[in-house]
Image (cartoon, grey):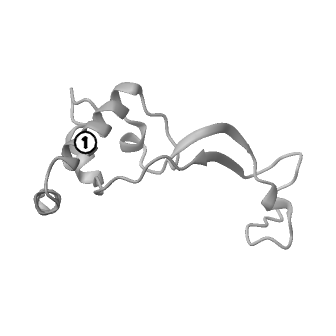
Amino acid sequence: MEIVREHSVDQSAFDQGHPYYDAKSVRDNPRWCVVHVEFRQKFPQVIKLRELQKYAKDGGVLQGLQTLKQSRLSVSKVSKQEWDFIMGLVDDRDDQPEEAVNKQQQQP
């Protein structure tokens, strides 16, 4: 996913007929926002959180990755260096047979 536009007020919070209606959210003081994203690519294999955490230790390339520091973030900034590294993990998996990748993922 890629963020394609700044966040904006979630209009569905004001619509009584919508499942995400929130009576406490008012237009002058909205409680909800929406982030505008677009699908870019599905990875051929899942990269598990545990694997990313290995690279977040002191001095690791992902030590500053917001998602690993504040796990409740649903959208977070990713630097070019972090993105390139993660995409490198994806590329490395593309070069391996699926069985080898699955075996790696099962290791603690």
Compare residues 62 and 58 and report the one nearer the observer. Answer: 62
Q: Give coordinates of residue 31: x percent, y percent.
A: 75, 52
Q: Is residue 35 visible?
A: yes
Regarding mark 1 in the picture, which secondary structure is present there? helix
Q: Give coordinates of residue 63: x percent, y percent.
A: 29, 32
| Residue pictured at 40% horizontal, 54% vertical | 42
Q: Quadrant of residue 17?
A: bottom right
- Is residue 14 left or right of 65 when viewed as pictured? right
| Residue pictured at 53% horizontal, 50% vertical | 39
In the picture shown, does residue 19 fall above or below 78?
below
Q: Give coordinates of residue 91: x percent, y percent.
A: 25, 42
- Is residue 106 left or right of 23 when viewed as pictured? left
Q: Is residue 64 visible?
A: no
Q: Quadrant of residue 18?
A: bottom right
- Is residue 67 left or right of 1 when viewed as pictured? left
Query: Mark 1: which amino acid?
Result: Asp
| Residue pictured at 22% horizontal, 30% vertical | 60
Give the number of callouts: 1
| Quarter occupied by the C terminus | bottom left
Identify the residue under disc 1: 91
- Is residue 66 left or right of 34 when viewed as pictured? left
In the picture shown, does residue 16 fall above or below 75?
below
Compare residues 25 and 4 and report the one nearer the observer. Answer: 4
Mark 1 packing: few (<14 Cα in 10 Å), some, or many (20+)?
A: few
Q: Give coordinates of residue 38: x percent, y percent.
A: 58, 47
